[in-house]
Structure formats: structure tokens, C-alpha cells
Image: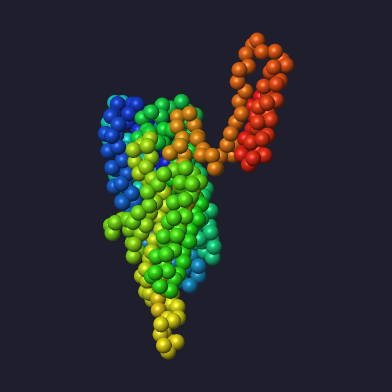
Amino acid sequence: MQFVYGCVHLLFEAYPVVLTGGHNFRPGVWGLAYLPLIAGGILGVFGYLLIFHPRYEAAMDRHEARLVSPEIRLNLALSPPFAIPFFWFGRMDILSIHFILGTNDGRRLMGLFDLDLCKILALFNYIIDVYLIAAASALAANSVFRSAAGVIFPVHLLFCGIDRSCMPAPAFQNVDLQKLFLRTREFLWQEGHTAHLTKAEADKEVREILDLYHRVYEELLAVPVIPGIKSEKEKFAGALYTTTIEDFVPSSGRGIQAAILHCLGQNFSRPEMFNIMVEDPNDPSGQGKTFAWKNSWGLSTRTIGVMTMVHGDNQGLVLPPRVASIQAVVVPCGVTAKTSDEDRAKINNACDDLAKSLIDGGIRGEGRS
């Protein structure tokens, strides 16, 4: 799973390098090369559902009451055609070959379906079948390792002498390792799911958690954010309303969702969902029940990626004082080749004393003699 996932993200990074450097595509135009990936992904899902999953169901019928071996899922995952798209993509470097032949490579094979996606779906199902009782934990561990592979494979381009100036977003040109913390590569969540008696109690918690996340970004990470409520089209499906914290990334000119909170109302408490009921204190008989009001909220390692994009630059990582391991560095100045050893020692000792006083005062500092 990690290898397939890493290869997919490696091809994502390689597309602009080949199309801009080899075929001289303008930035923005080469992005059209991703259109076949969308078509291949759609075809891949239908291919899995219509071809490979029915084969598994047929195997279940043959085994009747006996459990089907999870290894049956691997028939697709171990199929040889996985390597073919990489050879096809490599042909794009031959300028006499039309680029469209290469753009159909990585996810679509000979106009069929997205084999990489089918393999990922097969491996997901294999993990679930093998670790049936602890499937959620197994998938969580898999998420961590495949996210790491999704970063390590593309970052390898940095050590291959490839010009990264053709990458689409300037934010990703600055510090590539921030990708480990964004979107599908988020590997650690602080998540909450709560139930309340009334809507007023649920609304109060949403405001409290929203303010807490707001403070995490502005007071701890020194990142200015804007809290608000998402539109009806953008809110979480089934939620009563969704609140969010949004940030602006100056280097790319884009916004990013920094944290999200949902007031799910009573929709997820009803019998057709989770059937969560509490005793109704307003019922005089004392026997009445009412559906709970639910909230869902979460913060993830995306905070690290947002902080990196906002404060980092082409010189490297920049950390705000409250999270920096070293908040202050005392650097001796005025030392020249003519400075005597005695004066040099006085300056260095003064710097060390200043660094010590900073540390005693609660500042994480050090001296650079």
C-alpha cells in the first residue's frame, strides 16, 4: 500500500517537471494533463465495483458458510500491469512522442481503468479482512505509513537535481516537507464527538471549541485566522451547520481550512443512524425520551503545515517563539582579527551570562560564542 501510494504521488510531482521542462508547456496549461487522471479514477472505481468485487462475491458463494481467504483480494493488487504505466510515462521524455500518450499512463492503462486506484481499493479491503476485529486501528496505522510514503517519494526529487521552479504552488516550492501535514497526508487528529440535551448546549460548545482553535493558531502559532460559518453547500453532509477557521497563505495566494466544527443537530441521533436518546427532563411523566444533539470537531497535523507555509520562506523553516525549541540566540559582535584574546573572552563571557539570564527568566535561549 505504501509503495503504490508513494508512486502515485511521485507521478503527481513528475508531471509538471516533464511537461514544462521537456515539452515547454506554460504554467497553467500543463495542468490540463491531469484531466485523464480524473477520468481514470472514475473508471477505476467502476472497474473495481463491476469486475473485481463481483469476483470476490462469487468466491464467497463458492465457500458458502466458510470464511473466504483474505488473500483473494490480492489477485488484483499483485497484477503485473502495475509497472507498465511507469514505462509508458517515461516515454514522455522522448519529444517526438506526443504528450497525450504519456498523460494517459499513470492512472489509465491502454484506455482501461485506473489500475493504481483499483490496487489501493483491493489493499484496503485486504487489510480490513485480515484485521477484522481491529480494522479501524489497522487502517489508522496504514494511514500513517502511506502518508509518509506519499511525502518521501516526491521529496526524493529534491536529491535528483530537478528544478522545482515549475511546481504549481509557490507554497510547495518553499518547504516540501509541509506536504506531510496537509490534506490526505494528515496522520494525527485531535477529534471530539459529543452529545447534548439541548441545541443551546450544543451551540455553546461549538462556540467554545471554535474559540479554542482560534487561540491555538493566533496565540500559539502566531497565524492570523478568520472564524466563520460555511455556506449550505459547503457544510458537512447531514450537519445542521458547520463552522470553520480559515487561513490565507501569502506565498500561494490561496486560502486553507485550518480547523472545522460541525453541529450535527439531531440528524445522526435518529433511529436510521445511531439511535442516541436521552431522558427528557421536560416530560412530566419522567418516561419521555428525546434525541441527543450531537457535535463533531477536529484539529489535525495540518496546523503544522499551515504554520510552515505562513512563516517559512526560501531560507527554510521559521517557527514562532511560543513553539520554537530555541527562542533567542545571543551572538557576539564586534570581534575582529585585531581583537585580543582577553577582549574576546570578555565578549564571549558576557554573551554566555546574557544567555543564562534569559534561560533563568523562562526564555529558551543559548549563546553562540
Residue 17 seen: yes
Which residue is at 37% across, 37% downward? 250
Frontmost residue, 360 versus 316 = 360
Frontmost residue, 120 versus 260 = 260
Tally of numbered discs:
0
Residue 61 seen: no
Image x and y of residue 311, in percent: 46, 37
Position of the C terminus, as image quadrant, is top right
Image x and y of residue 90, in percent: 38, 32
Which residue is at 40% across, 76% downward? 291
Image x and y of residue 181, in percent: 47, 45
Image x and y of residue 124, in percent: 46, 55
Frontmost residue, 161 versus 73 = 161
State the residue lying farthest toward the top. Answer: 338
Q: Is residue 269 above or below residue 13?
A: below
Which residue is at 66% across, 13% downward? 339
Which residue is at 42% across, 61% downward? 206
Q: Is residue 290 above or below residue 53?
A: below
338 left or right of 86?
Answer: right
